[in-house]
Amino acid sequence: MGSSKFKRYFQLILIVLAAGSIYPLIYLRSGYQETILSVFNISFEQLNILYTVLGFVFVVGYFPSGLLCDKFSAKKLLFVSMAGTSAGGFWFAQVPSYTSVVLIFAIWGFFAVFTFWSAHMKLVKLISTSDTEGRFFGVLDGGRGLVEAVLASVAVIIFARGLGGAETPESTEAALVGVIYMYSIVMAVVALLVLFFVEDDKKLIEAGGEVAERNKFRAKDLLEVFKNPLVLLMGGVIFCGYFLFWTYFYYGGFLQANVGASAVTVAAVMAAAAWMRPVGGVIGGFLADKAGKGKVISAALIGGALCLILMSVLPTSGPATIFFVLAIVGSLFVFAVRGTYWSILGDCKLDVKVLGAAIGFISLIGYLPDIIIPIIANFLFATFGDYGGYNAYFIASAVIGLCGVLFLAAFWRVAKKAAKAEKS
């Protein structure tokens, strides 16, 4: 691109800070599921309902978010997203009623996807080049994971100190509230950084030597997105990869409920697992540029699926350390998947004026698990019980993850045919 390498990486760091701080509070269940159930006095089914609401708002918002970022400033959209999600966090820290919590999750869904998702993805695509897409999207997810890991580690310290050595209802609530406040304050600070330092996407387009097309977008241009088979196949790849990734949010509950680990131990293991995000994302991204995107994504999908199968079939009466290691290694694989599956966006050969719409449409397909998984989890847990429910869910996720390898193979076959046709 026309802009300097330093400028491109500086912009990437700012976007990473935003992406890394907006989602941890929303998915606090990954390390504090049992604590949330206790403090908010809700059931496992009610918690899944919250995430069904969140998933519904997410899925409904993905495609419009693409249209929105093709029309308005991505910088302003990012600021609004961070500020709105932070405000929801301060409300959540008051430990309100379940009805209010449902509304908070709906608010989070709106700000974390409708105004944020496609805007930040489009910015990364614009500042990357054809030979750095893998590493830029890898750094986005890995860097986001680094931010999340740092925050998760700070959260463990706050949580442990809040407990004060005794897990009473009062100390547990105080500890969790302290964690919620920390995440909310960080988001507010990042919102200000975004407001003052992130460049507008229009400038990035012009810096790349292209004419900004925001005002030339027409509804008929969407046919370019809908008719592109690579867009549909990419949606399938992300659907399977994201389905596999979602198991990360159930690792903590599995370790505490099935393996019998304490709340503090689970929080520590999940904090360690969170550190796999920068490792998996960054290494996966660089390997994708060097060894091939298809090979890296496929290997990560297979590795993540195998870890889930082992967690499901090994007896929990054995050493707990085995399950701690599987959770951490499994996290490494699923984060490698997340860090690389968006890198194939450039192979779809899309016009910049419909880039946001394409990201939104792919996300609409790819992130359907946000709605589907909580429903499936409720069914499996109701059918197989609390213990068997985790095993059934992990096996189902492993199967879906392996299906992603098939979608990816189909994607590359179509992409190669399209490339040959274009050359001829």
Image (cartoon, rainbow, N blue to C red):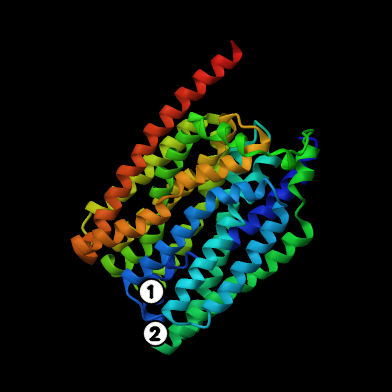
Q: Is residue 121 left or right of residue 400?
A: right
The spot of residue 161 in percent (x, y) is 51, 81
Q: Which mark is residue 173?
A: none
Of the pair 142 and 412, the residue shown nearer to us: 412
Q: Is residue 50 visible?
A: yes
The spot of residue 325 in percent (x, y) is 37, 56
The spot of residue 227 in percent (x, y) is 51, 30
SS at mark 1 in the image: helix
The spot of residue 376 in percent (x, y) is 30, 56
Q: Residue at x 46, y 35 (%)?
A: 232
Q: Is residue 3 left or right of residue 85?
A: right
Q: Quadrant of residue 116?
A: bottom right
The amino acid type, in three-letter code, at marker 2 is Glu
On-image quarter of the N terminus: top right
Residue position for label 1: 263
Q: Are marks 1 and 2 in contact (CB under 8 Å)?
A: yes
Residue position for label 2: 167
SS at mark 2 in the image: loop
Q: Residue at x 58, y 52 (%)?
A: 117
Q: Quadrant of residue 257?
A: bottom left
Q: Is residue 114 left or right of residue 56?
A: right
- Ranked by sequence position, the earlier of labels 1 and 2 is 2
Q: Is residue 329 visible?
A: no
Q: Residues within 10 Å of mark 1 (few under 14, many from 20)?
A: many
Q: CA distance from mark 1 to mark 2?
A: 9 Å
Of the pair 304 and 73, the residue shown nearer to us: 73
Q: Residue at x 48, y 29 (%)?
A: 229
